[in-house]
């Protein structure tokens, strides 16, 4: 599951609202981490925004940290954790916090984003079934 979530280039294929994703740069660190900077474009009806994030892949810790760099948010941060449960299964944790720069945009898009983020787990589960089988 770590590899599936870390494969950000595939997000437009299955992540709700994700219209495009472009990795600007990727750097392999000596301690095993991989750091990348990516632009994600989200779209819903007439709304379309691109934001930039720093993504830190930490395979040794079984975690992924995403930090917001630029775009329509005042802040956005999310963290994935993966706990091995044996026999090819794991518990996946997902935490996200965000706030739009504009109160108007926040009131217009906040409910829609909340609904989309709730659908994330289903989207990743379905992707795992497609990639690894049920």
Image (spheres, rainbow, N blue to C red):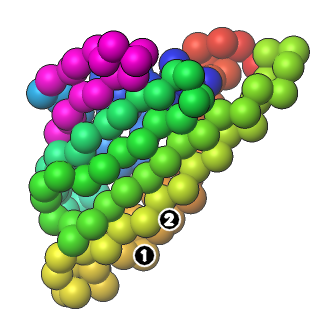
The residue to which callout 1 is attached is 111
Of residues 86 and 71, which is closer to you in this image? 86
Of residues 94 and 105, which is closer to you in this image? 94
Residue 29 located left or right of residue 133: left
Q: Is the residue 103 above or below the residue 50 in the image?
A: below
Q: What is the number of callouts on the image?
A: 2
Q: Is the residue 110 above or below the residue 38 in the image?
A: below
Asked if residue 101 lies in the magenta stretch, the reply is no
Q: Is the residue 91 above or below the residue 73 in the image?
A: above
Residue 61's disc is: none
In three-dimensional space, the C-alpha distance between marks 2 and 1, rounded to whole angstroms, equals 6 Å
Dot 2: element: helix
Quarter occupied by residue 15: top left
Residue 47 located left or right of residue 93: left
Residue, far right? 87
- The reply to whether residue 35 is in sight is yes
The chief SS type of the magenta part is: strand
Crowdedness near tag 1: few (<14), some (14–19) or many (≥20) residues, C-alpha within 10 Å: few
Q: Residue at x 21, y 71 (%)?
A: 74
Q: Residue at x 37, y 57 (%)?
A: 77
Q: Residue at x 15, y 23 (%)?
A: 25
Quarter occupied by residue 21: top left
Of residues 60 and 77, which is closer to you in this image? 60
Task: Give the quadrant of the N terminus.
Answer: top right
**Callouts 2 and 1 close, C-beta under 8 Å:** yes
Q: Position of residue 31 (x, y in %)?
A: 40, 18
Q: Position of residue 50 (x, y in %)?
A: 15, 50
- The reply to whether residue 13 is in sight is no
Q: Is the residue 114 above or below the residue 96 in the image?
A: below
Q: Position of residue 56 (x, y in %)?
A: 36, 34
Residue 115's disc is: 2
**Range of magenta residues:** 25-41
């Amino acid at each position: 599951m770590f590899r599936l979530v870390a494969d950000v280039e595939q997000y437009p294929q299955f992540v709700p609202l994700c219209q495009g994703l472009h990795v600007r740069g990727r750097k392999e660190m000596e301690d095993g981490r991989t750091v990348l900077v990516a632009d994600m474009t989200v779209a819903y009806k007439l709304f379309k925004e691109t934001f930039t994030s720093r993504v830190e892949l930490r395979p040794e810790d079984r975690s992924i940290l995403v930090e917001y760099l630029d775009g329509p948010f005042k802040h956005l941060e999310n963290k994935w954790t993966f706990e091995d449960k044996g026999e090819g299964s794991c518990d996946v944790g997902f935490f996200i916090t965000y706030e739009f720069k504009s109160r108007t945009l926040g009131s217009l898009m906040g409910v829609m984003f909340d609904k989309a983020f709730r659908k994330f787990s289903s989207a990743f589960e379905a992707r795992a079934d497609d990639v690894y089988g049920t």
